[in-house]
Amino acid sequence: MTNAARLIIVGCGHMGLAIVRGLLGVPPHRDIVVVETSAERRAVLSAYGGFTIASELEIAEGDFVVLAIPPQVFGAFADAQRHRFTPRTPVLSVMAGLTSRAIATALGTSEVVRAIPNTPSEVFEGMSVYFAEAAVSPRTIAQSDELLRAIGKAFRVGAEELVDDATAICGGGPAFVSYIVDAFCQFATSCGFTEAAGREMAVQVFGGTATLIAESGKPPMQLCREVMTPNGTTERGIAAFDAADLKKSVLAALTASALRSRELASMSAGVRVGETDG
Ligand SMILES: NC(=O)c1ccc[n+]([C@@H]2O[C@H](COP(=O)([O-])OP(=O)(O)OC[C@H]3O[C@@H](n4cnc5c(N)ncnc54)[C@H](OP(=O)(O)O)[C@@H]3O)[C@@H](O)[C@H]2O)c1
């Protein structure tokens, strides 16, 4: 991390750990401190090594703070910890549905970057989208960008509402994709494949197709049509998707998820942040 004394990750659950594990795997060496209130979780984290585990937050000059706690507890966190933040403490929030302004106001620092990463960060395949108000310093933006790029791809958006939409696409995306991969696995085992064989086929098909889409540069529907021989097996499968309106279902799921993020963001912007529930 660019000249930062320490990288402090507050909250080390699924997302916090994905970020830490991703960062531990790539140079440069970072002095990482994880602040975790759950004793049970601290015990789990101690098995990993490579970072310091603390139960109490302490912030020194130059430290960079990543907030990966649940949005519901942020209000109480801000009430208890606000005094540790200065108006220039750099903060990268990955909390879904909390606006950068609400976070800045609650903590008393104007240096807030709001990002939505995802759990593939753990294997350096993360996808993060982030927003920063114009007043945020180039240094904090560069530090956030560097951190997010260490664990995958990242880009900045100029309108904060797009982070809510990205919450559905990137944040929820791994869950949505896993849901569909599970259907492939279920089908494979129902045919008589072992669970391991079904998993291997499904994972390779999804990973291989993602690489093919990326490397060919072709539109996804072109790749779809290219393997649809008239009256063939793929065409029959796509016809079943269309009959079930699968694309409409996927769009409805993404829209519902993005709307929920906007709902949470507007609640956090207008009322005490601790009252959010999502
Ligand atoms: N999971 C994802 O794919 C994903 C994607 C994008 C963004 N996010 C965001 O990332 C954040 C964390 O999500 P998650 O899925 O990692 O949740 P999680 O697994 O529940 O992890 C949150 C961790 O923070 C701990 N914690 C709670 N209050 C704390 C405090 N005051 N100080 C330090 N630690 C505290 C929790 O301990 P207790 O269990 O004791 O409360 C828990 O271990 C959320 O804001 C979420 O919106 C998640």
Image (cartoon, rainbow, N blue to C red):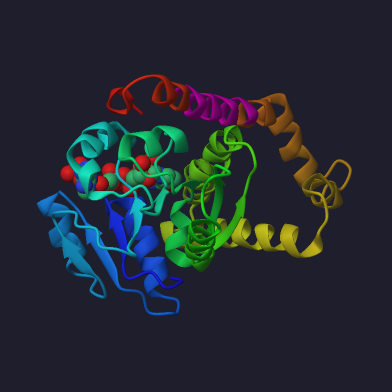
Up-down relation of residue 4 to residue 19 (above or below): below
The quarter of the rendered structure image containing the N terminus is: bottom left
Viewer-proximal residue, 73 or 81? Answer: 81
Q: Is residue 67 visible?
A: yes
Name the residue at 31% across, 23% down. 272
Name the residue at 30% across, 44% down. 69
Viewer-proximal residue, 106 or 120? Answer: 106
Up-down relation of residue 89 to residue 274 (above or below): below
Image-quadrant location for residue 57:
bottom left
Q: Quadrant of ligand 1?
A: top left
How many numbered discs? Answer: 0
Question: Residue 228, how many percent across, how many down?
Answer: 83, 47
> Does the stretch in magenta take in 255?
yes
Q: Is residue 99 visible?
A: no
Residue 69 located left or right of residue 258: left
> Does the stretch in magenta take in 167?
no
Residue 276 located left or right of residue 251: left
Up-down relation of residue 80 to residue 197 (above or below): above
Question: Residue 201, how many percent across, how many down?
Answer: 56, 60
Viewer-proximal residue, 178 or 260? Answer: 260
Question: Residue 14, how many percent across, how many down?
Answer: 33, 51
Name the residue at 64% across, 29% down. 251
Name the residue at 55% across, 56% down. 202
Question: Residue 242, how many percent across, how many down?
Answer: 73, 29
Residue 110 located left or right of residue 276: right
The quarter of the rendered structure image containing the C terminus is: top left
Up-down relation of residue 277 to residue 122 (above or below): above
> Which SS type dominates the magenta stretch?
helix
Bounds of the magenta segment: 251-263
